[in-house]
Amino acid sequence: MLSCAGADRLQTGMRGAFGKPQGVCARVAIGQVLLSVRCKDNNSNHAQEALRRAKFKFPGPLAKRLPGQAFLTSAVNA
């Protein structure tokens, strides 16, 4: 947070409407995982809806992949 004269022209944080960030936030490669969600089976529809809504905050085309049990670890190791 800048507090000097003209600071409003130095920051580019959240100028866009609806919380769309302006400027580079992260460099990602094609095919890189951006978000990962782990939930119980009975909450999977809520997680899928959350991912659907979140994809509009990222530029470019995004794909949703449901790997099943392949990438899950036990909650004890968390």
Image (tube, rainbow, N blue to C red):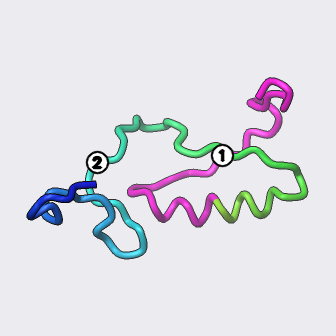
Identify the residue position indicated by label 2 in the image.
24
What residue is shown with label 1?
Answer: 65
Q: Badges 1 and 2: C-beta atoms under 8 Å apart?
A: no
Q: Residue at x 49, y 37 (%)?
A: 31
- In the rendered image, the quadrant that contains the N terminus is bottom left
Helix, strand or loop at mark 2: loop
Q: Does 7 appear above or below 38?
A: below
Residue 17's x, y, as percent? 36, 75
| Position of residue 73 in the picture relative to residue 16 (left or right) | right
Q: CA distance from mark 1 to mark 2?
A: 25 Å
Q: 48 or 26: which is nearer to us?
A: 26
Count how many numbered circles sit on residues in the image: 2
Q: Position of residue 11 (x, y in %)?
A: 21, 57
Residue at 87% from the left image edge and 49% from the top image edge: 40
Residue 75 belongs to magenta span: yes
The region drawn magenta spans 51-78
Magenta segment, prevailing SS (helix, strand or loop) = loop
Q: Is residue 3 magenta?
A: no
Q: Which mark is residue 56?
A: none
Identify the image quadrant of residue 73: top right
* Lower sequence index among marks 1 and 2: 2
